[in-house]
Image (cartoon, grey):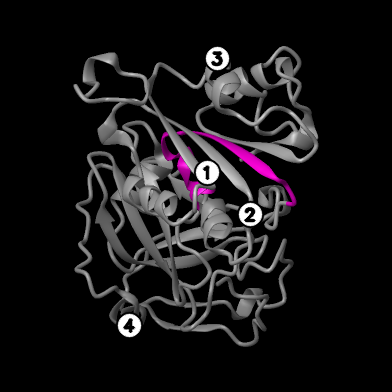
Amino acid sequence: MFASCMNLGNLRFSALKDIAKNLVPATASRTLPRSMWTLPSSRPAQEAVITFDDVKDAERASSCILPTTWVDCPLVGSSQYNHDTYIFEFGLPDGKSLDLPTCACLLVRAFDKEGKEAVRPYTPISNNAMLGKFQLMIKVYEQGVVSQYCKNMKIGDVLSFKHITFNCKIRYPFGKKSITMCGGGSGITPMYQALQCLIDTPGDETDITLLLGNKSKADILLKDELDGMVARSNGRLKIVHVLSDANSLPNDWTGETGFIDKAKIEKYAYPAAPDTCVFVCGVPQMYEMLCGPRTEKEVKEGSILAQLGYDASMVAKF
């Protein structure tokens, strides 16, 4: 299902107007309205010609087509997913896959209204079978520089991406008998990336439990896709939803409430052992409580996972 490392060769882009014409999906894409946020690096589609020629020999951290230096990709499609989340599609050279390892993410560079740079990591929700483009699911925050920047892009505007070694996390096949996933909000994206391999690769027998925290049921991302994975997993995938807003709970809610805490880890996670792993992705407070900062490989002393016997070889921070 996933593309192998490709021969990059001569990856010249055609004009962005041709990319927009050829790569916008059959479902109608819409141009999102601009606001006070400026796009200092955007260029008119009819004038811009983006090429990978300048970076074809650049360093690469993995099989990913994107180098470790910044390269621009055009916005070729966008759609609103729910009340605060969008799916953005960015163009690649025609017929080429992003070829991103699982699990790995991309760095995105954007600018605030004063032109100050901001860099954030995002994990694509598209897999390597998608050619000519890739998809990011981004939750838009009121004060989120990168998310606001993306929301206000127009078709043909460009965004800078790169892929570095630090953003190559544990790689599939993971070599574990069982995996517990702890995701919060849009932290589902690296879990979803991994699940596409774990569930859809013939012969994979890994058992997986996903603990997924959200504020309300309306905030759950990729729910239909996750339900489909459960249905075709032959019992290997179990999902436990955890909602934190007690005032928004549906009357028929049968999932957990509160947060992904020690009691829920003890109840649902696979016990600490050499043949298991816990994946963690969410807001900084979630890392601090469960395992310590995502920038530190070690499991923080006194954190929930440390208390339960997990060490760095059993935890992957995304």
Check disc 2 and report the residue beneath it.
205
Marks 2 and 4, how far apart at CA: 39 Å
CB under 8 Å between callouts 3 and 1? no
Mark 1 is on which residue type? Arg
Marks 3 and 1, how far apart at CA: 31 Å
Q: Earlier in the sequence, mark 2 or mark 1?
A: 1
> Residue 90: image x %, image y %?
41, 65
Label 4 secondary element: helix
Name the quadrant of the C terminus. Answer: top right
Mark 3 is on which residue type? Ala
- The residue lying toward the viewer, choosing from 28 and 305, is 305
Q: Residue at x 66, y 49 (%)?
A: 167
Check disc 3 and report the residue beneath it.
263
> Residue 18: image x %, image y %?
33, 84
Q: Earlier in the sequence, mark 2 or mark 4?
A: 4
Does residue 38 show up?
Answer: no
Marks 2 and 1, how far apart at CA: 33 Å
Mark 4 is on which residue type? Asn
Label disc, if present, on residue 120 of the rendered structure: 1
Label 3 secondary element: helix
Does residue 111 show up?
Answer: yes
Marks 4 and 3, how far apart at CA: 51 Å
